[in-house]
Amino acid sequence: MKIAQHKSDILNPKPVEMGFTVGKDLEYAAVPVMGSDTKLAIVYNAQILKVCRNRKSALNFIQKHKKAERDRRAGANGPLG
């Protein structure tokens, strides 16, 4: 019996999420979760912040977290007056 290799993604109508990085210095990474086709773990400063259900929710979370980090850093410096 001959076994033929085939591209399994051709048979799968939904592509598997590959992950991505975001930020000026690529500070955020969305890494695929093992055993899921759509879930992504958000990594920032070598820590997993959250597991998101899909790419859109991952991008929304990163956007909110970036804004919160920027506001937190601005508040830590105090007023310049």
Image (cartoon, rainbow, N blue to C red):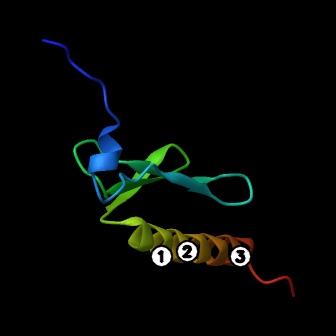
Provide the residue designation for mark 1: 60
Along the line of sight, which residue is nearer the eye, 6 or 25? Answer: 6
**Mark 1, other Cα within 10 Å: few <14 / some 14–19 / many ≥20:** few
Question: Which amino acid lies under the numbered mark 3 shown in the image of this protein?
Answer: Ala
Q: Earlier in the sequence, mark 3 or mark 2?
A: 2
Along the line of sight, which residue is nearer the eye, 48 or 71? Answer: 48
Left or right side of 81 for 8: left
**On the image, which quarter does residue 49 sit in?**
bottom left
Provide the residue designation for mark 2: 63
Find numbered disc 3 in the image and state the secondary structure of the residue it sits on. helix
Quadrant in the picture for the N terminus: top left
Provide the residue designation for mark 3: 74
Which residue is at a point 67% across and 60% down the rendered structure image?
A: 23
User: Disc 3 and disc 2: Cα gap in Å?
Assistant: 17 Å
Q: Residue furthest top?
A: 1
User: Disc 2 and disc 1: Cα gap in Å?
Assistant: 5 Å
Q: Position of residue 8 (x, y in %)?
A: 30, 40
Q: Nearer the viewer, mark 3 or mark 2?
A: 2
Q: Residue furthest right?
A: 81
**Mark 2, other Cα within 10 Å: few <14 / some 14–19 / many ≥20:** few
